[in-house]
Image: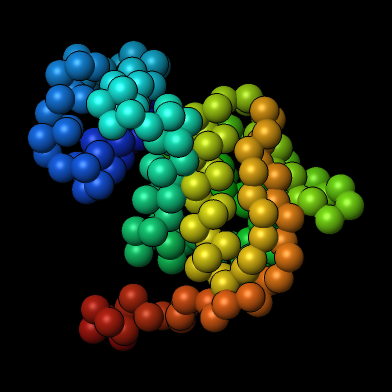
Amino acid sequence: MHRLVQRAIEEFIIANYGSDVWTKVATASRHRMTSDDETHGQKVMHAASGELRKPYVEMWEDLGAWLARLEPMRRLLRFSGRDFKDFLQNIVDLPDYTRMVVPDLKMPGMTVVTEDEVLRILVRRRDPEWIHAIAGVVRVMADDYGALGLIWVEPDGIAVQVSDDCFAEARDFHLGAGILREGLA
């Protein structure tokens, strides 16, 4: 697993559960930040799941949600659409955007299909970790856009049925807000 993902897992656990939990998880999983083991992140999340008594896939969904709530990530995600439905249609571009920043991160490709009232984000590699992490991102972005809908995980991806795209007031988003706030304008 990519070291950036390993680092995100570490930061997620520390931010949400504290350094003591991280120490227990790192010890239980024999965590090494320099590990090139493709399953290392899964081992760490399994250890965290056991320590916290939370389902393994829920840990990945929480990780995705935590990442999407980080303001720099949230801002990047909001560039993907003017509303939640637009964001969902454009989520297929996320792996390409990710590769521009982190070329060796192996994020799976996605396809979006609409069947009746349900939009499905099909993840090309049936990887439950990625599917659940992406589901966490989708849930947070629904809230961010003020959309109401049902979001559920399927074996090959995420299904979304949007009931109301303008259910609540969307979080404030301005294209240049970060630049103006930092005094760079």
Residue 23 horizontal/vertical position (percent): 12, 28
Q: Residue at x 54, y 81 (%)?
A: 169
Q: Quadrant of the N terminus?
A: top left
User: Do we see residue 99 in this rendering?
Assistant: no
* Number of marks drawn: 0
Residue 100 horizontal/vertical position (percent): 48, 46
Q: Is residue 158 left or right of residue 46?
A: right
Q: Residue at x 38, y 59 (%)?
A: 69
Task: Name the outermost residue toward the front.
Answer: 53
Q: Is residue 48 left or right of residue 123?
A: left
User: Do we see residue 120 in this rendering?
Assistant: yes
Whether residue 167 is situated above or below residue 96 in the rendered picture:
below
Task: Work out whether residue 46 or residue 36 is closer to the camera in this orientation and state it.
Answer: 46
Residue 93 horizontal/vertical position (percent): 62, 50
Name which quarter of the figure residue 33 lies in. Answer: top left
Q: Residue at x 43, y 66 (%)?
A: 75
What colour scheme does the image use? rainbow
Q: Is residue 44 left or right of residue 114?
A: left
Residue 5 horizontal/vertical position (percent): 35, 34
Q: Quadrant of the C terminus?
A: bottom left
Q: Residue at x 43, y 29 (%)?
A: 55
Task: Name the outermost residue toward the right.
Answer: 116
